[in-house]
Image (spheres, rainbow, N blue to C red):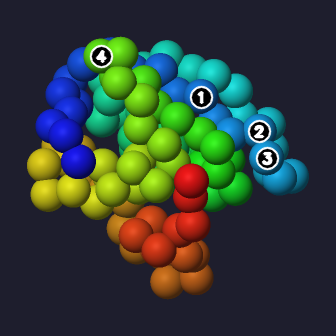
């Protein structure tokens, strides 16, 4: 995966497929890191399907967003693992 500037402004476009438990809409974030954290920690996993993150005119799909969150270079603290939840690394996202 190419380098991402986690401090750059970002736009998150949630996927439209499936029946998400709540409606998630397009959002702008001051940083890509905040957008990635929101996508993984706050959005319903189904919303990652078909979602994309745009940073510096480059798009990252749902699976790539998961990879960005799990990357060693991700600058924010991650949420503690919930033993009942599906881990971000294995969440199915396209």
- Residue 65 lies, with reference to residue 79, above or below; the image says above
Q: Which residue is mark 2?
A: 16
Separation (CA) of disc 4 from disc 1? 15 Å
Q: Is residue 17 left or right of residue 67?
A: right
Separation (CA) of disc 4 from disc 2? 23 Å
Q: Which residue is mark 4?
A: 56
Which residue reaches farthest bottom?
A: 83
Element class at badge 2:
loop
- Residue 59 lies, with reference to residue 51, above or below; the image says above
**How many discs appear?**
4
Sequence-wise, which precedes: disc 4 or disc 3?
Answer: 3
Quarter of the image for residue 8 reads top left
Element class at badge 1:
strand
Q: Is residue 18 left or right of residue 47?
A: right
Q: Is residue 92 left or right of residue 90?
A: right
Q: Which residue is mark 3?
A: 17
């Amino acid at each position: 995966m190419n380098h991402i500037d986690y401090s750059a402004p970002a736009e998150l476009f949630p996927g439209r497929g499936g029946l998400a438990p709540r409606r998630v809409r397009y959002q702008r974030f001051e940083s890509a890191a905040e957008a990635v954290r929101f996508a993984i920690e706050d959005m319903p996993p189904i919303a990652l399907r078909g979602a994309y993150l745009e940073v510096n005119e480059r798009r990252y799909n749902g699976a790539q967003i998961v990879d960005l969150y799990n990357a060693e270079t991700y600058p924010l603290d991650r949420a503690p693992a919930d033993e009942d939840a599906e881990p971000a690394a294995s969440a199915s996202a396209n």
